[in-house]
Image (cartoon, rainbow, N blue to C red):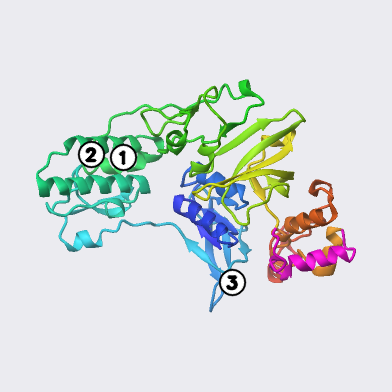
């Protein structure tokens, strides 16, 4: 899959596709910045999905079905840069840009509309109770404008209570005031500036609300204690870490956009906060006396590793860092499990995800050449104990992807079968081209203005 658009929808759906076993080749973003929350972008980078800023798709390849895509870099004027075109081998292209408000029913009912670019286009006029220009028609969520899920739910509660108030004549103004104040706080952070600009055109007023950037200054003071490390660097409306902490060690404050502050003297190291963070931005951390560190990784993939199993520890961009041993797996009811691994202290601050080798004999190691786990294991038992030998024998890495997917998987199986740590195995030769290139493209190449 090639995903077009790095808003929260593009980022989250890419991650969910990977959970379902789909390979996401890249996320393209025409802008010079990510459109969604940083925690969601960090989450997909950790699993190895590249986000290409200032890139766009020029065309799809294929007739009966998609076989690939041609992408290109963009200049400051959003125009494709000649010479930067390249092909990606994909069979699906997802478009996650150009979202429009769902105004059809309100428009058909005769509600007055206004064009507000910041909210996605035409939206119904409404008051703070979400009442439109027609007294008994209320709106919320995507019918009111393009925003996020939490504000849509709060708008829905406001609209529902306003309807109840109309029908029963009961005074529920205190609850309505609370919800409206909550909604204003949600929209008070820097990520909602566009929404505030749009709502101001509809008559809504917003007061300046302060928020804190948080700090973890006393993290090193508690060396040797299991404790959370929060890598949430953006002021966004989110607080599950605070509400889930049984010890009250994490605080957000009155403004939900504030970054979390941890009181490590109260923290028990339970890890509940790490399993409830929707951005997977919390990691458990403890320095051990033997020179290793225990790192708790929030993990939402199958299969789950077993205690004592060796996995590959990955960095913030999905790069392999070292081999790690699984200390324990703590399962969570919400399916965000915690996998605790042991790594050398020199690597611990960079480890943020893991790659678990497949145990199924029929599982594909190399999709391009259709090589299975069982075939790799059989070849190793026959004496092919080097990646280059396995490449020549099984054609692993000789397909269109050039080994991008199968190289590390093969090395993990090789390590498991031979007992040699991954970091001591040779990854083999990285042969050009790094991406598929047609002979026509090579034939049209020029050097110093002269045809070759």
Identify the residue position indicated by label 1 in the image: 196
Which image quarter is the C terminus in?
bottom right
34 relative to 27, above or below: above
Which of the 4 image quadrants contains residue 326? top right
The residue segment tinted magenta is 358-385
Disc number placed over residue 67 in the picture, else none: 3
Residues at circles 1 and 3 in contact by the CB criterion of under 8 Å: no
Which of the 4 image quadrants contains residue 136? bottom left
Picture coordinates of residue 426 (x, y %)?
A: 84, 52
Residues at circles 2 and 1 in contact by the CB criterion of under 8 Å: yes
Disc number placed over residue 237 in the picture, else none: none
Identify the residue position indicated by label 2 in the image: 204
Picture coordinates of residue 285 (x, y %)?
A: 63, 33
Q: What kind of element bears circle 1? A: helix
Q: Residues within 10 Å of mark 1 (few under 14, many from 20)?
A: many
Q: Is residue 373 magenta?
A: yes
59 relative to 407, above or below: below
Which of the 4 image quadrants contains residue 193? top left
36 relative to 222, above or below: below
């Amino acid at each position: 899959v090639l995903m077009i658009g790095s808003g929260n929808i593009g980022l989250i759906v890419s991650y969910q596709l990977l959970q379902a076993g789909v390979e996401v080749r890249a996320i393209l973003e025409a802008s010079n910045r990510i459109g969604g929350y940083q925690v969601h972008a960090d989450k997909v980078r950790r699993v190895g999905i590249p986000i290409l800023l200032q890139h766009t798709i020029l065309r799809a390849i294929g007739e009966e079905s998609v076989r690939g895509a041609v992408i290109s870099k963009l200049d400051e004027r959003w125009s494709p840069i000649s010479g930067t075109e390249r092909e990606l081998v994909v069979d699906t292209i997802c478009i996650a840009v150009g979202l429009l408000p769902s105004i059809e029913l309100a428009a058909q009912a005769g509600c007055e509309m206004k064009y507000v670019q910041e909210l996605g286009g035409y939206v119904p006029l409404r008051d703070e109770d979400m009442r439109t220009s027609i007294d008994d028609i209320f709106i919320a969520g995507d019918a009111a404008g393009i925003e996020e899920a939490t504000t849509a739910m709060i708008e829905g509660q406001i609209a529902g209570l306003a309807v109840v108030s109309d029908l029963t004549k009961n005074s529920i103004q205190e609850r309505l005031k609370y919800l409206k104040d909550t909604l204003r706080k949600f929209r008070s952070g820097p990520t909602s500036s566009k929404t505030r600009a749009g709502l101001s055109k509809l008559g809504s007023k917003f007061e300046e609300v302060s928020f804190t950037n948080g700090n973890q200054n006393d993290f090193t003071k508690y060396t040797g204690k299991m404790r959370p490390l929060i890598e949430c660097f953006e002021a966004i409306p989110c607080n599950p870490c605070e509400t889930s902490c049984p010890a009250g060690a994490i605080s957000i404050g009155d403004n939900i956009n504030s970054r979390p502050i941890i009181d490590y003297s109260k923290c028990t190291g339970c890890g509940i906060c790490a399993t409830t963070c929707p951005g997977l931005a919390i990691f458990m951390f403890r320095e051990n006396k033997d020179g290793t560190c225990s790192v708790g990784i929030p993990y939402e993939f199958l299969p789950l590793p077993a205690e004592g199993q060796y996995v590959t520890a990955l960095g913030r961009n999905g790069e392999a860092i070292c081999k790690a041993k699984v200390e324990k797996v703590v399962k969570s009811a919400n399916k965000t499990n915690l996998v605790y691994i042991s790594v050398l202290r020199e690597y611990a601050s960079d480890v943020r995800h893991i790659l678990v080798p497949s145990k199924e004999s029929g599982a594909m190691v190399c999709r391009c050449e259709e090589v299975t786990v069982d075939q790799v294991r059989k070849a190793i038992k026959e004496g092919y104990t080097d990646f280059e030998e396995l490449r020549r024998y099984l054609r692993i890495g000789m397909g269109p992807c050039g080994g991008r997917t199968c190289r590390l998987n093969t090395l993990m199986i090789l390590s498991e079968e031979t007992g040699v740590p991954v970091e001591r195995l040779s990854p083999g030769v990285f042969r050009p081209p790094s991406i598929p290139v047609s002979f026509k493209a090579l034939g049209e190449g020029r050097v110093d203005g002269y045809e070759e």
